[in-house]
Image: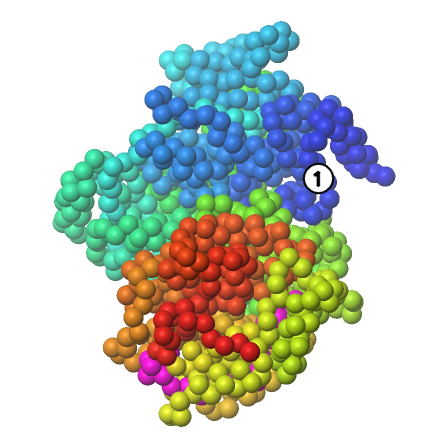
């Protein structure tokens, strides 16, 4: 056993003794995940610890001090400068220490644990008309502890400034394991009765006071010069004229001086009224020229971005995903607020007139619609991810994404910066907090080769000199971390650098807290995550990954760690993470582990890895990440490829046979549906389910007879010349052929009479279980039949099968024929939106509908969602259960996944169903779910309440006596 392994074993044993029950993980399935944050760096830790209390943190710091092991505190892991990775123990505060301890509406304060997500705090304080002012774009997953570590700001910093301005008190644990409280007058022991702690904290404070007294001049002249000066330590808060504010001085130290366990933060009132202006420009420099004038109008936000981000958003989520922007190649968002909406709108109109008169804009408008504002803000908030992988497939990286200057110097700095980019042959995607002079940029650095890394060093050194020349700062909110710590000597005098080092040494004499950042920094080109070609294991895959230059390796590298998949505040992505809260169940965690597998890092057994298999196990293959992830990670496809490779030549899980081969077995069952259904409802059915790895907690859906299928297909076709081809998928064919009949009648009613194809399969169930060789054979047969010179639009009633034909078929087969077929595929919703006869109106519809949109439809058919169609057709209220139903094809039928399936359903779908009132055993509310999985889950959740989900075709069926009339299935 190596010395490192022996020391780790001793550390774990010590923690088991001093903190019984503390969760400590040391395997590659955890250390591989936590080797990354959202930066360019990769530093695998020895262990990951999940504290539940400050006492746990004390135990960890004392044990690590004894063993000489470094400690890195981590929140949401969204740090872009390498602030949240470290070589020893990583403390993940987000998992358990995430409670809001107290809110005082009168004092406008809140006491929170370090792992509290910002959006959770804002939701809780909104009940009192209050909020936390700083609002980083990562607000749905960043933690308060992380914001304190970086001194985060956000979109509305021109009004609310930095996190440090809102901190009343920090509860910390020192490097030697003493609990203390830092406030606006100094430092004290948390327990005044602990004599030893009181003495140690008093000595620490006295040492800091001596340091400040010795360096008053450089602290006064070099620190606090511009609003966004985050780089280094904020020692000016300790000046006599500032009252020795120890709380604010520790904000922004990136966990390198003490570990924050909780904080008391100051809240601000929520604005009663607000509005948004969108301003177009030919160029970001033109936009920057207008910023000083805009700031005179006391805005809450002045945000900028260039055209590359908007183009990528439209490509990722559809052309209608970004509306409300005027003509231009760069834009500013300007938000104004006040107490009266009419007055705010009048100010916005007046500001718009003033800016038009200045002559730099290409256009501008006031955005009144709240929904449109939310959509526009999402584009800006996803900027880091959208800029990472652009529409042309190019990759860009952080490293110089956080410089800031005074707003009045912004235009001049941007001119110089763009000249510098050009001189180095680099391209940067610009966005950021223009109102605060803080510019984010991701640059197409070559970090994979020695020459590229050397060129990156040269550029960063010159960029640091440029921003200092304009009176700016290397970091405006992300912190220095590993990306900029080495460059602090360009910005500060040697005396100031020595003062920073002395400050850290007082708090952390052994240098164990987050080593490598700010003081004694690591080289900025050390520990870079981007592997070189020699590091990458050869990867031959069946999926073609046509949008990624390096195939599978390039595809999994899409994840850059921004962590949108870790949001627990609603949405579609990522259902398993929202159900469990575990990093390895997030899209990011799985992608990082796949990156480790490809590079042969902490995961060294390639496709046979049990760690990767286990991390992918709870992925529902919902495909939401392919749409919601700003960089377009498609974990469902990666999982299918992995399962194919992992089980190649091996016995598979039983459910891969029982559920993966369902299209074939269901077809056979259709010839004897009645006896088969009777058999499955009895004791033998439960035995067969167990043998097949299928849960016995669900009722197995009844198979439809071949006779009912033939009858439904006959009613689907009218004998008129066909304008569409109805693809009767395996689920519709096997379980609900009445949907095919209804779909055919709806198409005819909409002027789209169809012919039907009932004997083909898209291959979906073989894809989702990773049986890709079989899937390709099935797909090839289907494409051969459909690519027959006929260009009829192909309409598929089952969204998951439509998505498989649209995406999986061309990406698995990679042929022109497959791409031609995919181009013709529509869901029923899409066909009615895009192809229906002008003026078509369906039968009378209900006023209110509860809707469960299939995740594959949401992800694959962008801008063609049932919600939009129903609203267009006159349904006044569409109450959508946003997110996955939890069944997700085979996932929720597998015995080991039943509990997770139900936990996912609890997030959105079940609460919607619970809100439905049932009268005399019937429900007046119509529930619509096109996906067979979704409808099956709804039936399971509803029990005997009389709720049945209708397919959209059944709702719109002109032959139905009433909405919700069930068809025959026998």
Write down the quadrant of residue 872 in the picture. bottom left
Residue drawn at x 18%, y 38% as measured from the top left: 340
Q: Quadrant of the N terminus?
A: top right
Q: Is residue 540 visible?
A: no
Side (left or right) of 919 relative to 273: right
Q: Position of residue 398 (x, y in %)?
A: 49, 47
Tell me the crowding category of disc 1: few under 14, some 14 to 19, or many 20 or more residues within 10 angstroms, Cα based.
some
SS assignment at label 1: strand
Q: Is residue 954 visible?
A: yes
Labels in figure, total: 1
Quick check: 150 above or below 677? above
* Span highlighted in magenta in the image: 746-772
Write down the quadrant of residue 411 in the picture. top left
Q: Position of residue 285 (x, y in %)?
A: 30, 49
Residue drawn at x 29%, y 70% as measured from the top left: 844
Q: Position of residue 598 (x, y in %)?
A: 67, 58
Side (left or right) of 43 relative to 463: right
Q: Position of residue 154 (x, y in %)?
A: 39, 39
- Closer to the camera in the image, 623 or 376: 623
Quick check: 940 above or below 679? above
Q: Is residue 749 magenta?
A: yes
Write down the quadrant of residue 184 in the picture. top left
- Closer to the camera in the image, 688 or 220: 688
Residue pointed to by mark 1? 25
């Amino acid at each position: 056993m190596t010395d490192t392994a022996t020391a780790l074993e001793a550390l774990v044993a010590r923690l088991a003794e001093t903190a019984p029950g503390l969760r400590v993980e040391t395997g590659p399935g955890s250390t591989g995940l936590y080797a990354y944050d959202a930066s360019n760096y990769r530093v695998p830790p020895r262990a990951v610890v999940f504290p539940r209390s400050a006492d746990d943190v004390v135990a960890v710091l004392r044990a690590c001090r004894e063993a000489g092991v470094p400690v890195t505190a981590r929140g949401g892991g969204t740090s872009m400068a390498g602030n949240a990775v470290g070589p020893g123990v990583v403390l993940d505060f987000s998992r358990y220490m995430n409670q809001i301890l107290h809110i005082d509406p009168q004092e406008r304060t809140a006491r929170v644990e370090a792992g509290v997500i910002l959006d959770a705090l804002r939701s809780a304080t909104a009940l009192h008309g209050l909020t936390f002012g700083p609002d980083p774009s990562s607000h749905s997953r960043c933690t308060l502890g992380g914001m304190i570590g970086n001194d985060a700001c956000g979109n509305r910093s021109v009004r609310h400034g930095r996190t440090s301005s809102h901190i009343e008190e920090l509860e910390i644990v020192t490097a030697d394991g003493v609990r203390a409280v830092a406030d606006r007058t100094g430092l004290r022991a948390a327990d005044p009765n602990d004599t030893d702690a009181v003495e140690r904290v008093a000595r620490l404070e006295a040492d800091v006071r001596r340091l400040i007294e010795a360096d008053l001049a450089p602290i006064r002249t070099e620190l606090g010069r511009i609003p966004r000066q985050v780089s280094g330590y904020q020692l000016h808060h300790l000046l006599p004229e500032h009252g020795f504010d120890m709380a604010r001085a520790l904000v922004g130290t990136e966990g390198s001086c003490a570990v924050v366990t909780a904080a008391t933060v100051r809240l601000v009132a929520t604005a009663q009224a607000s509005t948004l202006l969108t301003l177009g420009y030919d160029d970001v420099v033109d936009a920057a020229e207008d910023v000083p004038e805009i700031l005179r109008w006391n805005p809450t936000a002045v945000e900028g971005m260039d055209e590359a981000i908007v183009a990528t958003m439209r490509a990722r989520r559809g052309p209608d995903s970004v509306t409300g922007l005027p003509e231009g190649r760069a834009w500013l968002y300007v938000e104004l607020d006040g107490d009266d909406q009419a007055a705010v709108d009048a100010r916005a109109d007046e500001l718009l007139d003033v800016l038009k008169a200045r002559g730099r804009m290409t256009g501008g408008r006031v955005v009144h619609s709240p929904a449109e504002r939310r959509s526009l803000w999402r584009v800006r908030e996803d900027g880091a991810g959208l800029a990472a992988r652009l529409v042309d497939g190019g990759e860009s990286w952080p490293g110089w994404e956080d410089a800031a200057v005074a707003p009045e110097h912004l235009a001049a700095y941007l001119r110089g910066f763009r000249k510098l980019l050009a001189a180095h042959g680099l391209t940067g995607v610009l966005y950021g907090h223009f109102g605060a002079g803080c510019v984010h940029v991701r640059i197409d650095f070559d970090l994979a080769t020695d020459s590229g890394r050397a060129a990156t060093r040269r550029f960063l050194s010159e960029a640091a000199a440029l921003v200092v020349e304009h009176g700016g700062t290397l970091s405006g909110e992300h912190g220095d971390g590993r990306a900029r710590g080495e460059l602090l000597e360009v910005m500060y005098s040697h005396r100031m650098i020595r003062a920073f080092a002395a400050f850290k040494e007082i708090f952390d004499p052994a240098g164990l807290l987050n080593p490598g950042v700010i003081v004694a920094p690591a080289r900025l080109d050390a520990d870079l995550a981007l592997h070189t070609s020699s590091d990458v294991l050869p990867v031959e895959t069946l999926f073609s990954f046509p949008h990624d230059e390096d195939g599978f390796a390039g595809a999994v590298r899409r994840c850059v760690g921004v962590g949108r998949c870790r949001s627990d505040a609603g949405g579609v992505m990522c259902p398993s993470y929202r159900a469990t809260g575990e990093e390895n169940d997030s899209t990011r965690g799985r992608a990082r582990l796949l990156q480790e597998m490809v590079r042969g890092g902490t995961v060294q057994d390639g496709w046979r890895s049990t760690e990767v298999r286990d991390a992918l196990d709870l992925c529902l293959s919902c495909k939401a990440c392919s749409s919601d992830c700003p960089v377009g990670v498609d974990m469902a496809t990666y999982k299918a490829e992995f399962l194919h490779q992992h089980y190649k030549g091996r016995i598979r899980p039983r459910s891969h046979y029982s559920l993966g081969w369902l299209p074939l077995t269901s077809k056979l069952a259709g010839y004897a549906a009645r006896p088969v259904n009777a058999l499955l409802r009895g004791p033998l059915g439960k035995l067969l389910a167990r043998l097949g790895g299928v849960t016995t907690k669900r009722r197995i859906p009844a198979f439809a007879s071949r006779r009912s299928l033939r009858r439904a297909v006959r009613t689907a076709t009218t004998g008129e010349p066909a304008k569409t081809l109805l693809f009767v998928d395996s689920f519709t064919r096997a379980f609900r052929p009445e949907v095919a009949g209804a779909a055919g009648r709806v198409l005819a009613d909409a002027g789209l009479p169809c012919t039907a194809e009932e004997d083909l399969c898209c291959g979906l169930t073989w894809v989702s279980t990773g049986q890709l060789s079989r899937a390709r054979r099935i797909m090839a047969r289907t494409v051969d039949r459909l690519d027959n010179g006929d260009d009829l639009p192909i309409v598929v009633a089952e969204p998951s099968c439509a998505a498989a034909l649209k995406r999986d078929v061309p990406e698995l087969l990679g042929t022109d024929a497959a791409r031609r077929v995919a181009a013709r595929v529509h869901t029923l919703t899409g066909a009615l939106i895009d192809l229906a006869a002008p003026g078509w109106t369906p039968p009378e519809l209900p006023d209110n509908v509860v809707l469960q949109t299939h995740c594959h439809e949401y992800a694959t058919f962008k801008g063609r969602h049932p919600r939009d169609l129903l609203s267009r057709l006159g349904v006044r209220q569409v109450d959508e259960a946003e997110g996955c139903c939890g069944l997700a094809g085979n996932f929720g039928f597998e015995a080991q996944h039943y509990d997770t399936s139900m936990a996912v359903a609890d997030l959105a779908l079940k609460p919607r169903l619970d809100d439905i009132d049932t009268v005399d055993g019937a429900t007046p509310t119509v529930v619509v779910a096109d996906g067979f999985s979704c409808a099956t889950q709804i039936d399971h959740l509803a029990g005997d309440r009389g709720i049945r989900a209708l397919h959209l075709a059944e709702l719109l069926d002109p032959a139905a006596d009433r909405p919700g009339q069930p068809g025959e299935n026998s």
